[in-house]
Amino acid sequence: MHLIAAEGLTVRYGAATVLADVNFALEPGEIVTIVGPNGSGKSTLVHALIGTVPAAAGRVTRKPGLRIGFVPQRLQLDTRMPLTVRRFLSLPLRQGAGAIATALARVGVPGLQERQMTALSGGQFQRVLLARALLARPEILILDEPTQGLDQPGAAAFYRLIEEVRNETGAAVLMVSHDLHVVMSASDRVICLNGHICCEGTPTTVGAAPEYRALFGLGTRGALALYRHEHDHAHAHGDDHAHDHPEREGESV
Amino acid sequence: MFDDFLARAVLAGIGTALAAGPLGAFVVWRRMAYFGDATAHASILGVALALGFALPVFWGTLAVALAMGLAVAALAGQGHAMDTTLGVLAHSALAFGLVAVSFLPGVRVDLTAYLFGDILAVSKAELGAIWAGAAAVIALLAWRWSALLTATLSEDLAQAAGVNPAHERLVLTLALALTVAVAIKTVGALLIAAMLIVPAAAARAFARTPEGMALAAVALGALAVVGGLAASLALDTPAGPSIVAAAALLFAASLGLGAARDRRP
């Protein structure tokens, strides 16, 4: 049984079609990464799967009683609502002090219980969000660009943490990302999205697909270009990789 | 003690503060101040309709406040700009209400009693209605508390946890309509929003958790009621506005307290 599936899913915001005819299913334990440029509908797909965005056509099915651990792209809290980390972790289901302490320790930020949410650093905040997702004892972790606003080492550490907790819990993972070179290796499947599914498959298949090459594009070109330039001297001459991103060359050198 | 008009006034005010405290916290958290205004202003139309059809004012205001809340929610859902929608609805409802009152045949309605409240003239029956309404608001909020908080923080987090944010908005709309119906007698339609926002805003300086802020809002609201009524008695000022003025002074004091606490290492 699929944990979550979309059949012929189409989403419109007013007159604009953001997603067209998306077919997608996630199996238990699977790690799937969704990549795509800005405005390609990645977050919209996640929201449609969760149920905050209605389908204009097609349908989304979730396993009845599916426990979702959701880490949003950003959560804007302001100081109007006083909120300790402990209280936040108990929403909406009350959690015991022991479970909260364990979850915080697991994500590497022990002892933050009495801190105000608004007083956390960006890295602490994302880890607390992950702790909250874990407390739901999720069958699926959904992460929508969870490392936005973290610096490179912070993002890398966060991805390692996600991989660890997923290995411990066996939960399926659905991750939206544009840090493709970091997450791809851990994924069973990569879906390349641009208003529709352009291509999908194993990380290697997608990385080599012409549709993917055509798209990337704004999201990962910088990182990939950097990576390639390291190897330029050895073997890249004559390889068209280095030349199909000419406008990026100046920045990368 | 119910035979003393002052005791009834204090009890009516505290009943209002009991409902307005926790609901006011949500109004502050969700930036619903103008929504509260719109619902409260619409209640004047409810007063007119109730008097016209010889119905109890409580039910008239409740029905119209509820209709207003639902209309606003529906329009906002269709993507109309929220502040414009509310600006149009709030003031047109007040205007239509005032016009409708003028049509009432043979009834010389003292409008100021509904615009500014008439807390010193609260009857035993009205006191009962106020406390019943406040109890209903508190029961509603307590029942949905955790879901309401989650939906207020993030609709995505709520939906992922199986909480429907639209239902929670409806709960708040209903609670708001009830509170308006309760408070129109104590502080009046024009100042209801103040009873929602000012104690809750003042309570922020004292609280570390959402629950703490809601309770502090009730305490500060009750304090404003007692202080305002005392001032009204001593200085011969109108009761409803005196209560709101007392709440505003508490808010000003809380600003000083918050600043002092922030300076502490």
Image (tube, coloured by chain):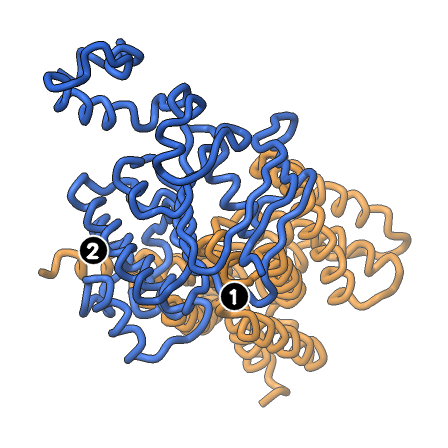
Q: What residue occupies the far bottom of the structure in this picture?
A: B1
- Name the quadrant containing residue B260: bottom left
Instruction: Determine which of the numbered discs, if any, sits on residue B96 in the image.
Output: none
Q: B23 or B230: which is nearer to us? A: B23
Colour for chain A in the figure: blue
Q: Residues within 10 Å of mark 1 (few under 14, many from 20)?
A: many
**A243 lies above or below A215:** above
The residue carrying pointer 2 sits among few (fewer than 14), some (14 to 19) or many (20 or more) residues within 10 Å by Cα, namely few
In the rendered view, would you say B65 is above or below B132?
Answer: above
Badge 1 amino acid: Ala
Residue B61, quarter of the rendered image: bottom right
Label disc, if present, on residue B147 of the rendered structure: 1
User: Total number of numbered labels?
Assistant: 2
Chain given the colour orange? B
Q: Are marks 1 and 2 on the same chain?
A: yes
Q: Nearer the viewer, residue B20 or A236?
A: A236
Residue B176 position, x and y percent, is 61, 60
First in residue order: circle 1 vs circle 2: 1
Identify residue for label 2.
B259
* Depicted B27 relative to depicted A35: above or below: below
- Judge depth for marks 1 and 2 and give the one in front: 1
Please give the name of the residue rendered at 60% of the width and 46% of the height, measured from the top-left corner.
A6
Residue at 25 percent across and 74 percent down: it is A101
Which quadrant of the figure contains the C terminus of chain A?
A: top left
Quarter containing the N terminus of chain A: bottom right
Q: Is residue B226 left or right of residue A186?
A: right
